[in-house]
Amino acid sequence: MQDQENQAVPNPQADAAATAPSTPAEPTLEEQLASTEARLAEMHDAFMRAKADGENIRRRAQEDVAKAHKFAVESFAEAMVPVKDSLETALTVETPTIDSLKEGVEMTLKQLNAAFERNRLVEVLPVQGEKLDPMKHQAVAVVPADQEANTIVSVLQKGYMIADRLLRPAIVTTAQAK
């Protein structure tokens, strides 16, 4: 009977232990601190690496810009050397004739034009009657003419552009308003 009584009397501690889910023990403050310090060290290391990478990229970019400035005219200079050689050769001829001088100048001009083309140096040579473009032309005089106002009457000096940038405007005279 006593066995039956023992079975009938509930034991609250045993029931609670049997039904409570097993939860892992919460980390102590020291463990949390160690974990946070480890994460901080990782993030600091990643930050320092990113900072060093940024400095390296900035330094390389500065070196590239310096080299580009230093050697920007190299291609043009290489194209101009034969032109200079031709002019010097023309001056060494002992008894030049007018025809030989003219032929030499024409060949030198061809070399110069080829150098300009290779380096994207383009002439700005407006034609008579073309509308004045202040981005490419510089009008130095307005003259009476039988054409529309603000159109080019004559070209006094060619202009030049490098790629899409104006190096020197064409110097022109324009028609006066009637």
Image: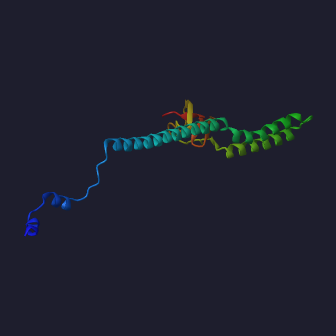
Residue 129 drawn at (x, y percent): 56, 42
Viewer-side residue, 176 vs 113: 113
Residue in the image at 79% along x and 41% along y: 82
Whether residue 62 sits left or right of residue 80 in the image: it is left
Q: Quadrant of the N terminus?
A: bottom left
Q: Quadrant of residue 94?
A: top right
The picture places residue 147, in percent across and down from the top left corner, at: 53, 40
Q: Answer with left or right where residue 27 lies relative to residue 106.
A: left
Q: What is the residue that sits farthest to the front in this orientation?
A: 2
* Residue found at x 74% / y 41%: 78
Q: Nearer the viewer, residue 135 or 130?
A: 135
Q: Position of residue 12 (x, y in %)?
A: 13, 58
Tell me which residue sits at (40%, 44%) in the image: 39
Q: Is residue 163 left or right of residue 78?
A: left
Q: Quadrant of residue 68?
A: top right
Q: Nearer the viewer, residue 178 or 24?
A: 24
Looking at the picture, does residue 115 appear above or below residue 18?
A: above
Name the residue furthest top. Answer: 140
* 2 relative to 79, above or below: below
143, above or below 38, in the image: above
Which one is in front, 107 or 27?
27
